[in-house]
Image (spheres, rainbow, N blue to C red):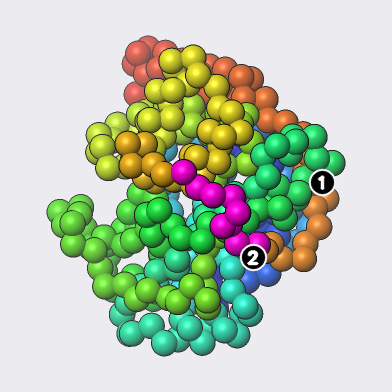
Amino acid sequence: MRLCAVAIVRNEADIVEAFVRHNLTVVDRLVVVDHGSFDGTSEILAALVREGLPLTVAADERVGFFQPEVLTPLARDLLRHDSADFVFMLDADEFLKTPSRRVLERTLARAPQGMHALVPWVTYIPEFEGAAGAEDPLAPLRSAKRLPVERKPQHKVAVARSFLETPAAFVAMGNHRVLPSDETPDAPCPHARLPQEAAAVAHVPVRSAAQLTAKIAIGWLAYLSSGRNNPALSFHWGEAYAKLAAGRRFSPSDLVAMAANYSVPESEWVASDRATWVDEPFLADIGLRYSKAGPVDDFAAVLRFAERMARAGYQLSAGTGTAAP
């Protein structure tokens, strides 16, 4: 069985090397779309390619976030031209977790013919107190513990070869499912849920206050730039962005609350007891060559992105019809 994965990333220098090296211990090939990064992510990806890893890097310089439009054709290309049996749809903060490749293949093989696979999404929370001064860039990932129960159980999709038989189908925003067409957004294609003990996606969305601030600010603005208007999509980014816009900064307790209630409306948040978190490491035995420990400069990142948005808007208003990179 041949397994591949795709992802679109932007400004993930603190985690992208670990993401690539870990997931390549599970899949045979990884395609990463660099979405206009300017924090060192592009340089790290280029270095990993030079190593000769089974990694392909493409670029998307648009300001707006067009995840389905970018990743859907990439998944089809891997199924068609790379003979992939399944393509995992990932983000840079997600790590495939399985007892072994053999177990994963056996589990995928049991999925009914024509169904895509749904891999449980499990949240991991690092130690935030004092994490910024850690000398090991892998320390936040190695220290992360799993929530015992997800507040809102979700899955990430691995598209099967049957995807080639449904040319109108696409991977929905968030990579949580496959939809048959734009006309039927509420009727997903058939999916088979995999057992968590055999396959899971370890999700580490929050690593530090600065990382989360930059992610929220840039992510929400990019979402708005894409012209989407669906309250069900990225609402958690919108809620967190409103806090930042009101002058609030994230404390360690905020980070825990946001990680523990990720993808849940703030009105439904509940406190998470650290004593219940599960010490269940997910990270493969990898080492890093290009990543360095250190805080993310959130202010500089947001300014850089704001400049890109301004330049893109000016070029459009000047009548070129295309946004600047």
Front label number (2 vs 1): 2
Task: Quadrant for residue 193, please give it.
Answer: bottom left
Asked whether the viewer can see residue 132, the reply is yes
In the displayed structure, would residue 274 be above or below residue 95?
above
Q: Is residue 318 left or right of residue 146?
A: left
Q: Nearer the viewer, residue 257 or 135?
A: 257
- Left or right: residue 132 versus residue 101 is right
Residue 266 drawn at (x, y percent): 36, 36
Q: Amino acid at mark 2?
A: Glu
Name the image quarter holding residue 40. Answer: top right
Q: Main secondary structure of the magenta part?
A: loop
Q: Give above or below for 190 relative to 41.
A: below
Span shown in magenta: 271-280
For the residue carrying disc 2, how many other residues have a C-alpha within 10 Å: few (<14), some (14-19), or many (20+)?
A: few
Q: Earlier in the sequence, mark 2 or mark 1?
A: 1
Residue 211 lies in what quarter of the image?
top right
Q: Residue 260: percent from the left, percent from the top? A: 49, 47
Q: Which residue is mark 2?
A: 280
Q: Which residue is mark 1?
A: 136
Which residue is found at the position 40% from the left and 53% from the top?
151
Front residue (pair 53, 81): 53
Q: Residue at x 43, y 30 (%)?
A: 240
Q: Nearer the viewer, residue 8 or 267?
A: 267
Residue 87 tag number: none
Give the side of residue 129 with respect to residue 34, left or right.
right
* Above/below status of 231 relative to 68: above
Give the alpha-carbon distance from disc 2 to disc 1, as whole Å: 19 Å
